[in-house]
Amino acid sequence: MAAQRRNFRERRDYFNEYSDMELVKRFRLDSAGINFVEGLIGNEIRSASIRNHALTSTVKVLLTLRFLATGKMQLCNGDDMGVSQSSVSRAVSCTIRSLSSDRMVRRFIKFPTSPDAIRRNQEHFFQIAGFPGIVGAIDGTHVQIIAPRNNENEFVNRHHYHSLNVQVVFDTQYKLIDIVAKWPASTHDARILNESGLRVLFENGHIPVHTHLLGDSGYPSRRWLLTPFRIPQPGPQTNSNNAHKRTRSIVERGIGQLKRRFHVLHGEIRLSPQKACQVVIACAVLHNICKDRQIPIPADDDDDDSNDEDDSDDYAQDHMQAGNDGAARGNNINGTLYRQQFAETHF
């Protein structure tokens, strides 16, 4: 019993000894930020009793942040911090489940729907390269996972490793304003968007007209989703493509920042697809909290702020594309005509 109390005190002192700079380096949050996160989810992850020296909610948050920030195996985290592997696993699981809850997502990942918020985003995007009417930049990115037990072939991407295909939308501050993390790697970007709530927002009139997303050639052209011209002609098409490329780089750098901040997204997440999706969402929520609190991207990493893989495929050439029915083709034709008119009007 005395040894248990001593280990508990040592573990507590281990967490108390970090300075703010060390916390920023290891956990991507300063001490005030850690207290903020603990205040958000502490009641949900707090142990029902203090028997057997149960881990405090703060310790659970720290263990989880270290796992997300470093991507280290839970057994290594346990060895480093004097906590058993089973305790680390339970602490990380319950904390990630709470961080990725609908309540947390609704609070910290918000797609702008009010006229003022949309106009503000449009003004910020316009300042980049003169591309008008843009509310966000969209893309898909792959997050590597171990081979799942069920439907293993669906999780193999075109780079021949197992992953999730995660849809993200960033604003000019590199904050996530939408994320969908539930699809296996073989799912095309266009299908993920077609079955997302984001499409419903635009096509059911919840977003004002002349409000657009920017996407790469992996997406179909829509009146609300502008993609580059495949073979641009000199003049408006070329000018539009140049401005499109510069403006859409926001999402590539946003993905790079997200993965730099949380190295668990760089390597192989050794969890089931369902739990790996929770990890991705938890990282997205924490990324936006860091942005709100102006916590900088870790300076000790050598990676640049760009997405490290090109996941786009030409929508017209992909035989696995979503929505091959007549309505989808009609929407694509209307979107293509609208894109041409848009380019001639603004470029």
Image (cartoon, helix red, strand yellow):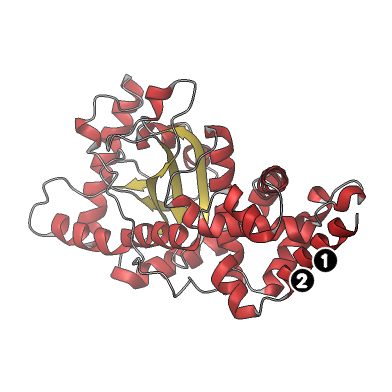
- Relative placement, left or right, of 130 versus 175 is left
Q: Residue at x 47, y 38 (%)?
A: 199
Q: Quadrant of residue 278?
A: top right
- Relative placement, left or right, of 203 versus 90 is left
| Few, some or many residues within 10 Å of mark 2 (<14, 14–19, 20+) | few
Image height check: is 314 above or below 251?
Answer: above
Residues 131 and 209: in front is 131
Amino acid residing under circle 2: Asp
SS for dot 2 = helix
Q: Residue at x 52, y 42 (%)?
A: 201
Amino acid residing under circle 1: Arg
Q: Quadrant of the C terminus?
A: bottom left
Gap in angstroms between the C-alphas marked 2 and 1:
6 Å
- Residue 67 point in image, percent of width and height: 58, 54
Q: Residue at x 85, y 56 (%)?
A: 4
Q: Are marks 2 and 1 in contact (CB under 8 Å)?
A: yes
Q: Is residue 54 visible?
A: yes
Q: Which mark is residue 224?
A: none
Residue hosting label 1: 9
- Relative placement, left or right, of 243 versus 290 is left
Residues 287 and 279: in front is 279
- Residue 119 point in image, percent of width and height: 49, 64
Residue hosting label 2: 13
Residues 298 and 71: in front is 71
| Few, some or many residues within 10 Å of mark 1 (<14, 14–19, 20+) | few
Q: Quadrant of residue 220?
A: top left
